[in-house]
Image (cartoon, rainbow, N blue to C red):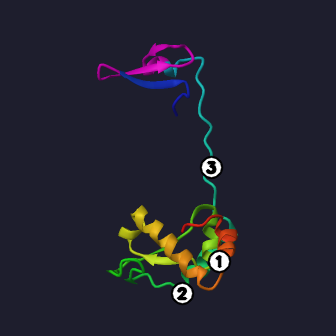
Amino acid sequence: MICINLRKRSRKYKVIFYCKAKRKEITLDKCKECKYKEYKEVKKIKKKSKKLIKLEKERDKDIKKSGVCEYCGKFSRRLDPHEVYGGSNRKRSIKHKFVKLICSECHENEKTIMKLRIDVQKEYEKTHTREEFISIVGKSYI
């Protein structure tokens, strides 16, 4: 583990270690013997909730993992299910079927994902109002 007071700096392209508590340059050996040594608290990674696991299982049971990308139309052996509105809206995206099967190239492209969000909103607004969409997702992408 590394002390929270230890900083790594460079001077004339040479690496120098600096102790924030002592306010001076030190070597790593002196840091190990330091009385001001403090360690950073390690946080555990948050596990997925049971509701989210259940939603993902229901989403994935009908999905084919190979086929044609829903955005670019190319054939791919591995399609990724992509929740169009992620983050805090991920569960809502799964619930309202805002999930598209796209290839890994489209999945990594931010412009593609933005166009997908607009297309999904237009598709949803054919049968519903914009106010209903905003109440689900939180904002309009059009």
Given the current orientation, which residue lies at the most extreme left position? 13
Q: Nearer the viewer, residue 38 or 128?
A: 128
Specify few, some or many for label 2: CA neighbours under 10 Å numbering under 14, 14-19, or 20 or more.
few
Q: Label 3, label 2: how many angstroms apart (C-alpha)?
A: 33 Å
Task: Give the quarter of the image for residue 22.
Answer: top right
Give the image location of residue 104, x and y in percent: 38, 70
User: Could you say whether the residue bearing mark 1 is in a helix, strand or loop?
Assistant: helix
- Amino acid beneath label 2: Asp
Q: Which residue is rendered at x = 55% and y = 66% of the image?
A: 141
Give the image location of residue 119, x and y in percent: 49, 76
- Amino acid beneath label 3: Lys
**Of label 3 and label 1, which has the lower sequence position?**
3
What residue sits right under mark 1 in the picture? 95
- Amino acid beneath label 1: Lys
**Of label 3 and label 2, which has the lower sequence position?**
3
User: Disc 3, disc 1: CB below 8 Å?
Assistant: no
What residue sits right under mark 3 in the picture? 44
Q: Nearer the viewer, residue 105 or 2?
A: 105
Q: Label 3, label 1: how many angstroms apart (C-alpha)?
A: 28 Å
User: Could you say whether the residue bearing mark 3 is in a helix, strand or loop?
Assistant: loop
Is 12 positioned to the left or the right of 26 in the image? left
What residue sits right under mark 2 in the picture? 62
Specify few, some or many for label 1: CA neighbours under 10 Å numbering under 14, 14-19, or 20 or more.
some
Can residue 82 be seen from the camera position used here? Answer: no
User: Disc 3, disc 2: CB below 8 Å?
Assistant: no
- Label 3 or label 1, whichever lies nearer to me, is 1
Is 103 positioned to the left or the right of 89 in the image? left
Is 127 positioned to the left or the right of 64 in the image? right
Q: State which region is magenta.
A: 11-30
Q: Is residue 27 magenta?
A: yes
